[in-house]
C-alpha cells in the first residue's frame, strides 16, 4: 500500500515560528555583564600555583631574618653571570651572598639580589604563613612568600618570584629563558620604615632594574598603587644582553577561559533551539 504524498505549500503554513533571537541576545548580554563583574571582583593570582610545593619555612615557629640555600634545578643567567643555586631570605628576596639583612636600601648596590619585596618581614608561629618553593627541573623555579611585617601580625604580604630556565608558555603568554617575574597577590601598605625595595640588582654598583614608576627601587606607602595587583598582571624583567627591561604584562587567568567557553556554549545551545 502506498502512502499518499501530500504537498505542503510553505505559504499556506500560517503558524509562525517563534523568534528566539531576542532571547539569545538578552542572555548573551547577561553573560557579558556577569563576566565583567567576575573579572572586576577577581583576586590577583600567582603565576605559579604554590599548592603542593616544598615548604622552606612554616608557621611551626617564628621565623625572623633567616635564609636557606637552594638549587634551582637548572643553570640560569643573571646579568650575564651563570648560577644554579640561590639563597632564599625570609625578608622578601633571593640573593647570591647568603645575606639575611632586613635593612633595605635603594639600588644600585654591592649585593646582587632579586627582590620582589625586600623589607623587614616575619613569619608568626600559628599564623598559617609560610614560604614555599615550586620547581620543575629545567623549566622554572618559583618562591612564594606569605608573610607579615616584623613585630606586627598585620599588614600581610603575599607575593612570588619565578625564574624561567626555558621558554615556557603559560595561558598563552610566552615567557623566555632567563625571564624573571614578580607576582603580587596581596600587598598591604605600611612598609617597615615607610619603604621596601623592589627590583633586580647586579651587585656591581651600576646596573639595576625596578618597578616602572620607581627611581631606585625604593617603594613607599604612597607608591603601593604602582604594584600590579590586578588579576592576571605581573611584573616581567627580560634581559636584552646589556640589562633587564621591565614591564607590566597581562597573562589571562585559566578561569577566564573556562567562563568564556561556558558562555559560548550557552549561546550555541540557544541558537540551536531557534
Image (cartoon, helix red, strand yellow):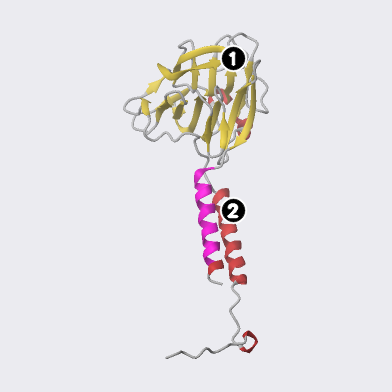
Q: Quadrant of the N terminus?
A: bottom left
Q: CA distance from mark 1 to mark 2?
A: 41 Å
SS of the residue under disc 2: helix
Is 132 placed left or right of 105 in the picture?
A: left
Q: Is residue 115 magenta?
A: no
Give x and y (percent) for residue 67. 41, 17
Pointer 2 local density, CA inside 10 Å: few below 14, some 14–19, many at least 20: few
Against 173, residue 273 (above or below) is below
Q: Residues within 10 Å of mark 1 (few under 14, many from 20)?
A: many
**Is 44 or 6 nearer to us in this picture?**
6
Q: Which residues are magenta?
A: 253-270
Q: Residue at x 51, y 52 (%)?
A: 259
Q: Is residue 57 visible?
A: no
Chief secondary structure of the magenta portion: helix
Q: Nearer the viewer, residue 274 or 2?
A: 2
Q: Residue furthest left?
A: 60
Residue identifier under label 1: 79
Per the image, the residue denoted by label 2 is 36
Query: Against 86, is 274 above or below?
Result: below
Amino acid at each position: 500500500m502506498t502512502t499518499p504524498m501530500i504537498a505542503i505549500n510553505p505559504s499556506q503554513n500560517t503558524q509562525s515560528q517563534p523568534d528566539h533571537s531576542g532571547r539569545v541576545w538578552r542572555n548573551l548580554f547577561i553573560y557579558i555583564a556577569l563576566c565583567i563583574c567576575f573579572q572586576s571582583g577577581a583576586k590577583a593570582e600567582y603565576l605559579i600555583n604554590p599548592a603542593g610545593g616544598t615548604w622552606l619555612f612554616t608557621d611551626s615557629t617564628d621565623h625572623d631574618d633567616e635564609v636557606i640555600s637552594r638549587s634551582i634545578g637548572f643553570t640560569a643567567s643573571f646579568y650575564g653571570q651563570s648560577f644554579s643555586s640561590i639563597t632564599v631570605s625570609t625578608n622578601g628576596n633571593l640573593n647570591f651572598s647568603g645575606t639575611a639583612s632586613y635593612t633595605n636600601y635603594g639600588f644600585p648596590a654591592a649585593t646582587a639580589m632579586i627582590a620582589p619585596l625586600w623589607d623587614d618581614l616575619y613569619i608568626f608561629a600559628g599564623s598559617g604563613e609560610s614560604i614555599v618553593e615550586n620547581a620543575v627541573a629545567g623549566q622554572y623555579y618559583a618562591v612564594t612568600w606569605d608573610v607579615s611585617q616584623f613585630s606586627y601580625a598585620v599588614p600581610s604580604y603575599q607575593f612570588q618570584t619565578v625564574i624561567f630556565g626555558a621558554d615556557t608558555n603559560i595561558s598563552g603568554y610566552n615567557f623566555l629563558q632567563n625571564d624573571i617575574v614578580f607576582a603580587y597577590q596581596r600587598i598591604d601598605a605600611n612598609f617597615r620604615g615607610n619603604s621596601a625595595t623592589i627590583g633586580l640588582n647586579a651587585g656591581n654598583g651600576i646596573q639595576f632594574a625596578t618597578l616602572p614608576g620607581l627611581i631606585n627601587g625604593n617603594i613607599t606607602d604612597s607608591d603601593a598603587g604602582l604594584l600590579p595587583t590586578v588579576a592576571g598582571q605581573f611584573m616581567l624583567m627580560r634581559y636584552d644582553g646589556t640589562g633587564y627591561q621591565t614591564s607590566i604584562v597581562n597573562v589571562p587567568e585559566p578561569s577566564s577561559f573556562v567562563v568564556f567557553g561556558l558562555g559560548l556554549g550557552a549561546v550555541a545551545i540557544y541558537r540551536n533551539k531557534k
